[in-house]
Image (cartoon, helix red, strand yellow):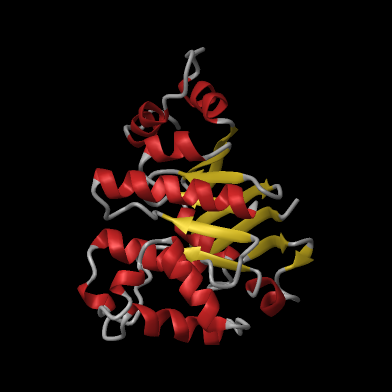
Amino acid sequence: MLLEVAHLVKRFRKVTVVDGVSFSIAAGEILGLLGPNGAGKSTTIQMVMGLIRPSAGEIRIFDLPFRRHRGEILRRMNIVSPYLSLPPRLTVQENLDIYARLYGIPNRSQKVAELMQKFDIEPMKDKLVGRLSSGEAARVGLAKALLNDPQLLLLDEPTAFLDPQAAARMRETLLAVQREAGMSVLYTSHNMADVEQICQRIVFLHRGRVLASGSPIEVTRAILRTEVPTPALQEVYRHVVAGGVR
């Protein structure tokens, strides 16, 4: 397995927000991490990224224990999130160049140029990031995240602030990039249509614990406790939020 999370726990003082979560991602797999607000999704991603330390449990990435190989592991992964903004007073090209330097990318000018062309952002290379539309900013953020050719990509609500057309384009781009590079993806979203289209397996969190895991149809049947013919993750989400699961 490319990523293994075992019995992960995170406590903030006396409050346990992640309570014994375990899951894994195989090479080339897209796994969805779902759940209502407060389920522990963001905290889990922050622990996988090394932004906060677990209270208990183990994270292994690339078959290496995260705590002992943090730097080596982080060089081989990246994250896309609309909540992580780029410096707004720098241009698109300046931002990408700075991150390419930080990641130690060889031939960084060539790499930046390739990604700008790939995501159709070359025409806006001299535009300040603070003046980009949500769709433009999303494409720049994805280009930034692919500078180091990550083997593991974390996608935290990547279509959160996009209109339907921009969100559809983002999904198509993500799937194309993932297939081309064969990277593994950990995907979180409140858009259940996104998840049904993109994710091969799902881990559904509720109150810090794994409520169900498996394919979209398996998770739907496990939580709704009915033999539905097709995935219905939106209904699953409403059911959990409404208190249908104890």
Q: Position of residue 121 (x, y in %)?
A: 35, 67
Q: Is the residue 72 above or below the residue 208 in the image?
A: below
**Residue 169 seen:** yes
**Residue at position x 71%, y 76% from top?**
72
Judging depth in this view, the residue of 166 and 69 nearest the camera is: 166
Q: Is the residue 216 above or below the residue 148 in the image?
A: above
Q: Quadrant of residue 151?
A: bottom right
Describe residue 101's horizontal placement relative to residue 244 as left or right: right
Describe residue 93's horizontal placement relative to residue 46 as left or right: left
**Residue 183 seen:** no
**Residue at position x 46%, y 24% from top?**
231
Q: Position of residue 153 (x, y in %)?
A: 56, 59
**Residue at position x 54%, y 75% from top?**
111
- Point out the image quarter for the C terminus: top left
Q: Position of residue 220 (x, y in %)?
A: 49, 25
Q: How many marks?
A: 0
Q: Position of residue 147 (x, y in %)?
A: 54, 72
**Residue at position x 44%, y 30% from top?**
245
Judging depth in this view, the residue of 135 and 231 nearest the camera is: 135
Q: Is the residue 152 above or below the residue 30 in the image?
A: below
Judging depth in this view, the residue of 238 and 93 nearest the camera is: 93
Describe residue 184's horizontal placement relative to residue 127 as left or right: right
Judging depth in this view, the residue of 181 and 73 nearest the camera is: 181
